[in-house]
Image (cartoon, helix red, strand yellow):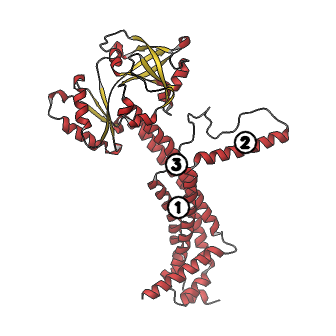
Amino acid sequence: MKGAKKNSLGWIGFVASRYVRRGRKNSPSPILAILGIATGVLALIIILAVMNGFQLGFIESILEISSYHLRVEEFPPEKADEIGDRVRSLHGISAVMPFREFQGLIRGRRSSQHGVVIRGLPADALQRDSGMAAKLEFESGGFNLENERSILLGSELARALSVRLDDEVTLFSIAGLFEEADTALVNTFTVTGIFRSGFYEYDLGWGFINLETSEALAGSKLSLGIKLRDRWQDRQALALIEKNLAGEAAFNNIKLSTWQDYNRAFFGALRTEKLFMFLLVGLIFIVVGLNIFQAQRRAVLERREEIGLLRAVGGGDTAVRLVFVWDGLIIGFCGAGAGLVLGLLIASNISFFFTIMESTVNWIIGIINFLSGSFSGAEEFAVFSPAVFYIKEIPSRIIPHEVFLIFMFGFLSALLAAWFASGKVSRSGPAEVLRYE
């Protein structure tokens, strides 16, 4: 029985592969279906990889620089060290950062001024928080907040204020108007570092000063930013912190929030954008699946005499139907596999392939200009020009489970189309088919 089953599968695979290789003169070539699936898988992998690169870059900038994974607020400032030590000792905590944050107005050279969000941090903040250190790239200077009159500015903010390293800026604290401040609200600072985060909003509107200095400008209110080893464990970590601090009167009014609560609207918009992009590009598989369905139905009709012959020599309904299903399996696997390999290759080297494409387009434009005698010195073509997009290179992030899902969409679209199209096989009797042959 096992040998018969093996032989049965053997002839099914042989006949199906023969149909794929040769096809029919009046039928669409299976190669077109394979190319259609490969194109869909390739496009979806590349599009989602680039989208993931942009979205995760923004999300990580927000989490590592601004919102942290968890926040502890509304606690007595004198209890900050105690809370920090107790939270730091809990499982899954990677960093605890005390900070103050307030809005202000900053003035640079030539009387230029700009609104700014100022965050007070300890001088050793980058040693405490490796995630933040990885996201901040200093164009000049460094993370130097040892001096109480030092300030770090975003690259776009420094450009807007026309200031460079070691220049002086004047900071006016808006928050200080509503808080108890020990010194004047207007203070002069020296620029000791100009950073770039890759997130335009931060580079244009953020600055960092010494934590002790921030108390004079923003009052004594203090917050703790907490980083987790796994940000998706935020709810568990929140419950653990609440349990650890429960039962003490000083912490009755403490406020805890997670990164998902703090950035709910923004992250929800990104999730919706990605979902709709996935659905729109996924329509490719629906179109290809319908084409395969129609092609397979036509193949069933055109091969009625062959189907009748196969059934006459002992092929059952299921076995003959599996010939066409196997045909769809081959098309789906080859198409999805080819698209997967090419998609991963391009997505992993996206900047290199865009450079080749831009060079090719510029070369063609150069030849056209040469033949037409036009040497206007126009700007070169760039898909993602730094003058338009706030990026130095095209980001790309490949997420394994998304790649697997895309591959299965492409594979199953062909397999299911072949299965439903081959349903007419069981309605073709050998006597009826071979009566006039």
Where does label 2 land, which residue?
A: 362
Of the residues tagged 1 and 3, which is closer to the observer? 3
In the rendered image, residue 333, in percent from the top left (x then y), is placed at 54, 67
> In the rendered image, is residue 210 in sight?
yes
Where does label 3 land, which residue?
A: 49
Task: Give the residue displayed 22% in from the left and 29% down from the top.
Answer: 82
Q: Is residue 342 above or below residue 397?
A: below
Give the residue type that dot 3 points to: Ala
In the rendered image, residue 33, in percent from the top left (x then y), is placed at 61, 65
Where does label 1 land, which residue?
A: 410
Task: Give the residue displayed 25% in from the left and 36% down from the top.
Answer: 87
Disc 2/disc 3 C-alpha distance (Å): 26 Å
Q: Nearer the viewer, residue 385 or 170?
A: 170
Give the residue type that dot 1 points to: Gly
Q: Secondary structure at mark 3?
A: helix
Q: Which badge, 2 or 1, is on the more N-terminal residue?
A: 2
Q: Which badge, 1 or 3, is on the more N-terminal residue?
A: 3
